[in-house]
Image (cartoon, rainbow, N blue to C red):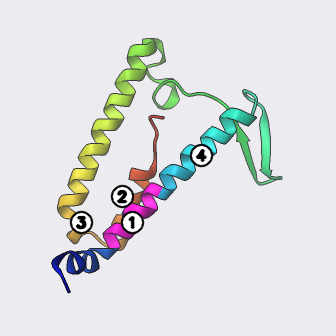
Amino acid sequence: MNKVGEYLKKHRIYFIFLGASILLFLLDLISKWIVELNCNLYERYAIIPNFLYVTKSYNIAIAFSLGSELGVFGRILNISISLIMSVIIAIYWFKKKEQFRKRDHVVAMLLFAEPSVI
């Protein structure tokens, strides 16, 4: 087997988690796009009646509206912090990935998949 094939076989689980992360990221974006195009602001829509509902709203600040008084600067700051932390987490995961358990890879996959800045 050639070197590329051996590498892919050895690191198969990492590519599976990366692919799953990308898939979850895309599903999240698509679901937000569908809500943006089809729902009115603050109206509740039943996805599964009596169990799962979607309400269109916008969060322009950090959790609990922290930083909302900062306007556009606050939004840029939030996005910058999120992107920097995502890069730091990705670099840490890539360097230490062989020391992680499967549970840790699942957590990293979910962190990568969350496009909170979009």
Amino acid found under the numbered disc labelled 4: Ile
First in residue order: circle 4 vs circle 1: 1
Tag 2's secondary structure? helix
Q: Which mark is residue 113?
A: none
Amino acid found under the numbered disc labelled 1: Phe
Tag 1's secondary structure? helix
| Magenta-colored stretch includes residue 19 | yes
Distance Cα–Cα, label 3 vs label 4? 29 Å
Q: Which mark is residue 17?
A: 1
Image quadrant where one finds the N terminus: bottom left
- Residue identifier under label 3: 97
Q: Which residues are magenta?
A: 13-22
Residue at x 65%, y 30% (from the top left corner): 57
Q: Are marks 3 and 1 in contact (CB under 8 Å)?
A: no
Percent position (x, y) of residue 30? 59, 46
Tag 3's secondary structure? helix
Give whichever of 16, 5 is nearer the camera.
5
Distance Cα–Cα, label 2 vs label 1? 9 Å
Amino acid found under the numbered disc labelled 3: Lys
Give whichever of 112, 100 is nearer the camera.
112
Q: Quadrant of residue 32?
A: top right
Q: Residues within 10 Å of mark 2 (few under 14, many from 20)?
A: some
- Residue identifier under label 2: 108
Q: Are marks 3 and 2 in contact (CB under 8 Å)?
A: no
Tag 4's secondary structure? helix
- Residue identifier under label 4: 30
